């Protein structure tokens, strides 16, 4: 397995130009991170947070308006063709030609990457075998289920044996079983081939499976680390309190107990060590004012709230 | 095979396979022009044909061939609009392939389809009472191939810049169809008002249609005197196609 940074992103900014009724939109506002060899790196954030823009820049689909991004030491803007040969890209939107068979799709893909003849045939066979699609090779893509199509997309992206795999929301439209298969397969690729993968997702459970995560919100990186490290940044437990007067009660809690309680989406959110001991104190301090109290271990959603001050899904609606 | 040609050839092949698997496209491209030809041609039977030897159904024949080519070119490039934002083309654009190669493959695919369909209809000319010399036939085949390339290139150029297929239909009705109306396909240049004649003279399609018209014979006489000499027709048609290709490559290279 190779050592060092495979993908490096430095001060990356991107602004979409104004179009007719839409004003110019700043999608990335100075993003920095690097991805090490053999890592499955997750880019988590609500839709509209800048994930897809970042993905498209790394895939050499378009150039950023500022900053730098490189793959295996090669600049994506300066030498896109050199980068492309090393990249396997699986877009969110299906890229298979539905009128063609699975085999034909891979056949054309191989030609685009300079493969041909017997070598290409061998690779198609192998990559279809790996995703368990060899027996469907002669079927037109339009007759395959969503799960099988995704697998074919993966086989297509991996055909030229790229060192780096970029996947944009890979589990879109997959049922839980197919989603699990996909992640098992990614893990296998990482262990056996030492492949480095960048995965964008807006699903918390998917983000949990990544080696490291970057949280992207409104074009900025708000947190970076392993899922467990991110969650442990939050002190102990997360307590949410339902009350008819959240703002007022929040102030009172702050005065009495200190800390940084916040109002998120109409309920009070408190991060606290030993939450089970705190709850009785809290409830007896404000009798009759609390409708319900919930205690939980921090999740990635809590990490998101901790860093942005609002909920993941609310924020999605606000920006998509 | 070098990578440039390998990529172009594979994209070309894909166009053909897709076409064969969608029979409605064959009907869509070949059907309407043939119906137009028969109905319009029969209905306008008494109109003048610019000093040529034939009746209107015969005069209208080369124009119909051009319409078949135009329709096929449009149908084969319209998919670019959807494909560019998502789908097959997206994965082509991140493959290590030059944009010239992609443009060439796509246009060559549409060209082949347009050319073959145009030729099929062209070969039916004797049924309409027209004859062709061997040399004239070769000349027509060359002209038809170059027109097919040029019009597919034009379709590519328009489709790449547009966001929606509705937009393409608007362009087609507002720009492509008038371009065909004013190519000498429907009425000869010689009988048109002066201002219209000028529009026809700057229309590159006029020269392609004229080359086809002047190569047909009806009872020993040329079907039409043509708008220009065969040499000029060939040169203009070639130049048009070359410009369309260069412009398509330039457009496809621009960041989207």
Image (cartoon, grey):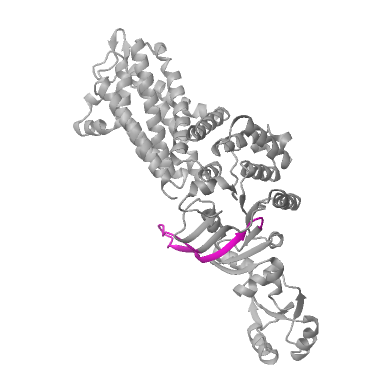
Location of the C terminus of chain A (image quadrant): bottom right
Q: Is residue A27 left or right of residue B248?
A: right
Q: Mostly what secondary structure, the magenta segment?
A: strand
The residue shown at (46%, 23%) is: B117
User: Is residue A17 located in the magenta-colored stretch of the structure?
Assistant: yes
Q: Relative to B118, does residue A200 appear above or below in the rendering? A: below
Between B39 and B188, the one lying in front of the other is B188
The residue shown at (58%, 32%) is: A116
User: Is residue B156 located in the magenta-colored stretch of the structure?
Assistant: no
Q: Position of residue A242 (x, y in %)?
A: 71, 79
- Span highlighted in magenta in the image: A11-39
The residue shown at (43%, 41%) is: B159
Q: Residue furthest left?
A: B194
Between A164 and A293, the one lying in front of the other is A164
Q: Relative to B186, does residue B11 appear above or below in the rendering? A: below
Whether residue B41 is visible: no
Q: Position of residue A262 (x, y in %)?
A: 64, 81
Q: Quadrant of residue A20?
A: bottom left
Q: Position of residue A250 (x, y in %)?
A: 66, 85
Q: Relative to B98, does residue A116 appear above or below in the rendering? A: above
Q: Is residue A77 left or right of residue B91?
A: left
């Amino acid at each position: 397995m190779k050592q060092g940074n495979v993908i490096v992103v430095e001060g990356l900014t991107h602004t979409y130009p104004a179009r007719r009724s839409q004003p110019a939109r700043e999608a990335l506002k100075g993003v920095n991170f690097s991805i090490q060899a053999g890592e499955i790196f997750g880019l988590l954030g609500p839709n509209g947070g800048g994930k897809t823009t970042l993905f498209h820049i790394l895939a050499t689909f378009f150039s950023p308006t500022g900053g730098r991004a490189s793959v295996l030491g090669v600049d994506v803007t300066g030498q896109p063709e050199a980068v492309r040969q090393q990249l396997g890209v699986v877009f969110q939107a299906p890229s298979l030609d539905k009128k063609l068979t699975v085999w034909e799709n891979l056949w054309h893909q191989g030609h685009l990457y300079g493969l041909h003849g017997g070598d290409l045939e061998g690779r198609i066979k192998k990559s279809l075998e790996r995703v368990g699609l060899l027996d469907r090779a002669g079927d037109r893509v339009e007759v395959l289920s969503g799960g099988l199509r995704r697998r074919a997309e993966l086989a297509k992206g991996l055909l030229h044996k790229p060192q780096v795999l970029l996947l944009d929301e890979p589990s879109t439209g997959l049922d839980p079983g197919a989603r699990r298969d996909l992640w098992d397969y990614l893990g296998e690729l990482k262990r056996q081939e030492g492949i480095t993968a960048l995965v964008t997702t807006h699903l918390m459970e998917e983000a949990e499976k990544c080696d490291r995560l970057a949280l992207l919100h409104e074009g900025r990186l708000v947190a970076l680390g392993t899922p467990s490290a991110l969650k442990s940044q939050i002190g102990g437990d997360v307590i949410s309190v339902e009350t008819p007067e959240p703002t007022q009660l929040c102030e009172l809690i702050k005065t009495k107990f200190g800390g940084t309680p916040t109002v998120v989406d109409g309920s009070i959110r408190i991060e606290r060590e030993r939450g089970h001991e705190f709850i009785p104190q809290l409830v007896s301090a404000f009798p009759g004012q609390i409708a319900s109290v919930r205690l939980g271990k921090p999740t990635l959603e809590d990490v998101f709230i901790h860093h942005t001050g609002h909920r993941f899904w609310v924020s999605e609606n606000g920006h998509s | 095979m070098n990578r440039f040609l390998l990529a172009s050839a594979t994209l070309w092949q894909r166009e053909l396979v897709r076409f064969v698997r969608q029979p409605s496209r064959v009907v869509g491209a070949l059907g309407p022009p043939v119906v137009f030809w028969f109905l319009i041609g029969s209905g306008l039977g008494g109109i003048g044909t610019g000093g040529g030897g034939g009746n209107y159904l015969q005069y209208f024949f080369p124009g119909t061939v051009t319409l078949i080519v135009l329709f096929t070119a449009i149908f084969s490039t319209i998919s670019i609009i959807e494909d560019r934002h998502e789908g097959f083309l997206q994965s082509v654009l991140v493959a290590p392939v030059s944009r010239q190669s992609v443009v060439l493959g796509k246009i060559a695919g549409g060209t082949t389809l347009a050319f073959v369909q145009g030729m099929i209809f062209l070969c039916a000319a004797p049924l309409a009472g027209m004859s062709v010399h061997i040399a004239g036939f070769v000349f027509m085949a060359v002209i038809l191939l170059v027109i097919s390339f040029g019009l597919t290139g034009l379709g590519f150029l328009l489709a790449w810049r547009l966001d929606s297929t509705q937009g393409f239909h608007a362009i087609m009705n507002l720009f492509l169809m008038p371009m065909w109306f004013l190519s000498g396909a429907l009425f000869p240049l010689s009988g048109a008002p002066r201002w219209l004649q000028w529009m026809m003279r700057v229309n590159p399609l006029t020269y392609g249609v004229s080359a086809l018209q002047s190569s047909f014979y009806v009872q020993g006489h040329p079907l039409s005197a043509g708008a220009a000499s065969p040499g000029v027709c060939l040169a203009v048609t070639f130049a048009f196609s070359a410009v369309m290709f260069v412009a398509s490559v330039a457009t496809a290279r621009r960041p989207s």
